[in-house]
Every structure is written in structure tokens, then in C-alpha cells.
Amino acid sequence: MPGSNVWTRSRARMRLFPEMFAQCSAEAASYGKCVAATTTGKQELTKNMCAKEFEALKSCFQSAMKKVAK
Amino acid sequence: MNVNLQSLRSLQRLCGAGWRRLSSMQGGSMNVFDRRMKRKQKKWASSLPDSAKYDYLKNEVGGRLADRIYDVSRTFPLALDVGCGKSHIAEYLSKDVVGRLFLTDISDSSLRKNKDCEIPTHSVQADEEFLPFKENTFDLVFSSMSMHWINDLPGALRQIHQVLKPDGVFIGAMLGGDTLYELRCSLQLAELEREGGFAPHISPYTAVTDLGNLLGQAGFNMLTVDVDEVQVHYPCILEVMTDLQGMGESNCAWNRKSLLHRDTILSAAAIYKEMYGSEDGSVPATFQILYTIGWKPHKSQAKPAKRGSANVSFADLSKTG
């Protein structure tokens, strides 16, 4: 479909993902470590177990996206 | 056709766990993959303007498969490529080994974009499970990177066995059990942490152990199965997924979840990088390729000796040296 529609716009946004993600590597690492720790420990992974780290990652990602949108 | 409904449901549950088991059902076959969707995905992938840049994996596997064809010290006047896609193997073969080649694929748009090769080819649009050829036609049948989307794999192998001439050979390459385990685990953990449960996003694969049994049941003998691993490094999880899409390898299993939340994508990207990332910041994706060679029985092939025909005894081994 030619022209700009919701699919072209959302695909364009997804194409920015790797760059934005690379800017939040510290938060991503801490979130990843939190989840990886549950795979080796005795506890099963349950919903929102690493919610704090994920919120930090998400806000970092969102501020990176806002900077690009400017 | 008598279909045992209970075993069908239990097999589907097993498929949800990510493994394909041998179908031990009477009559009807497993229906794991939406073949019409696979055709649409292949059509979309081949219509991309830069579709050649996603061909690296299929070209690599095609080259290794062509090596195995060369290893067989025979010439094949008539050969068949099942599920050829854009024909990634024929470009490595030469006219002295293969005389004429038939290319079949479920997607006609992929066939139209097939690569040039020096062997005269004919393209036929056909589903791998319904080969439109007579019995005892081909000297060689090969298949690369398409058998992992076949619903009734035992049936398809039986059809390949049928179209082969006696003393014909089948050489196949398909994705096996450990393929994309990093992607599968990252998505599972991310969905567990973010949503509380997980759904299968990676299609089920055949295990190495099952492949030998499948070929034996289809009537092939002198089987060899070997496993190869190709690891490709990507910047992050999104490149893995877009490249899989560009190759035409998107999931088409009926039980796939068609939605991936953006929180889950972000979380899976972080988990993938942390658990599997390498020092230079890239993440690996593993493709486990199963190569198999099987021969259609012929009286010229070596058979095990008859019982009682031995003329030396194992006890003589102790007398040597």
C-alpha cells in the first residue's frame, strides 16, 4: 500500500528500536541479570518479579525515543 | 479415515511444548502448519526488493548440501529439488553431476525468482506432500531448508521414496531441534516475567533421533544422519526476527500467537543480550541443520550377511599378536 498508513508508521518506529535499545545498555543489563538469576536459583520466574528494573529500562527507552522524535 | 482424536490432542499439546513427535496414529496426518500461510510468507519474502540479502543462510546450507552431492561418486541424469525456494543449491552443481533438474516449491513467486545455473531446469509449482511425478522417475532427490514446514513428514518421505528410481538417493537438509533456542528461551522468559505465561513463538522441529526412524519407516536404507551448527551474530533480537521474516521463515504453525507486546519485545531484547550476548555486543542465533542421506533399496546394494555364513571366528582375534 503506497503512502503513509498505520503499518508504514509503526514499521518505521520499529526500525529505530535497535539504536534506542543500544542507548539503554546499562538498564538492559541489570534487567537481564535479574531475570537470568531466577533461572539458576530455586525460585520460579513469576509475573513482575523484576518489575523495578523493567520500569527503569522502559523509561530510559521512552526518553531515548522522545529525543529522536524531536 | 479413522483418526484417533485423543492421540491427536495429546500430540498437539506436545507440539505446543516445542517438539514434534513421530505420528503413530492410524490414518489421518498431523496438521501443525498452515501451508497457505507459508505460501503467502514465501511470496512476500520473495517480493522484497532486497530479498537477496536474506539468502545467506540458505546459500550456505545449499553449498554444504551440494558438497554432499559431489561426495556421492555417481552422475544423476534426472534430479528433483523439493521445496527449492529461489533454488539455492543448483548454482553449486555442475552439468557433469546432474543432467536435468526439476525445481518444485509451494510458492510460484519464489520459483520465478530462481537463480541462474548451468543445468537445464524445469520449475513446477507443487506442495512437498503431493508430488505430481510418476514412480521410479528420479535418480536424485534433494531438499534443503523446507522439510521443517511439512505437516505429514512420514507421508512426504514416502512420496520421495516412490518417485526415486531403485538405487536412487535422497539427500536432505532441514532445521533440527536446537535451532533458535536462544530466541525461544528469551521470548519465554520475557513473556513469563511480563505477562505471567508464555505461548509458543518458534515452530516445532524434528529431533535428530526421530529423523533416522522416519527415513527407515519410509523405506530408505543405508542411512546417514549428521548434525551441523551454524551460528549467526546479530546486533539485537529485532534483527534476528526481521531476518527470519525476510528469509520467508516466519512461523506458520496453527498454534502461533500472532501478537507480541512491545514490553515483551523490549524485555526479550534485554534478556537475550544478557544471557547469550558476546563481548562485542552482538547476540548469536544458532541454526542446527540435520543432513541426511538415504538410498532406495536395490539388489546391487550391500546387504548384511546371512546368519551362519561366517567362516572366521571372533575367538581367533585373541590368537593374533
Image (cartoon, coloured by chain):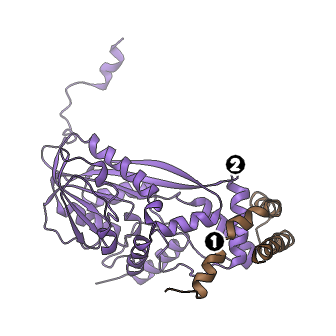
Chain colours: A brown, B purple
Q: Position of residue B106 (x, y in %)?
A: 32, 73
Above-or-below relation of B9 to B102: below
Provide the residue designation for mark 2.
Answer: B280
Residue closest to the far top: B321
Amino acid carrying mark 2 in the image:
Asp
Say what secondary structure mark 2 lies in.
Answer: loop
Indicate the chain on which mark 2 is placed.
B
- Name the residue: 68% across, 72% down: B265
Say what secondary structure mark 1 lies in.
Answer: helix
Res. B142 image quadrant: bottom left
Res. B163 image quadrant: bottom left
Note whether residue A35 is visible.
no
Q: Position of residue B75 (x, y in %)?
A: 17, 45
Res. B157 image quadrant: bottom left
Indicate the chain on which mark 1 is placed.
A
Note whether residue B31 is visible.
yes
Q: Is residue B305 left or right of residue A53?
A: left
- Name the residue: 65% across, 74% down: A14
Q: Is residue B314 left or right of residue B283?
A: left
Above-or-below relation of B5 to B23: below
Q: Nearer the viewer, residue B170 or B30?
A: B170
Q: Position of residue B29 (x, y in %)?
A: 35, 76
Where the N terminus of chain B falls, by quadrant? Answer: bottom left
Amino acid carrying mark 1 in the image:
Arg
Q: Which mark is residue B127?
A: none
Q: Is residue B297 left or right of residue A56?
A: left
Q: Which mark is residue A15?
A: 1
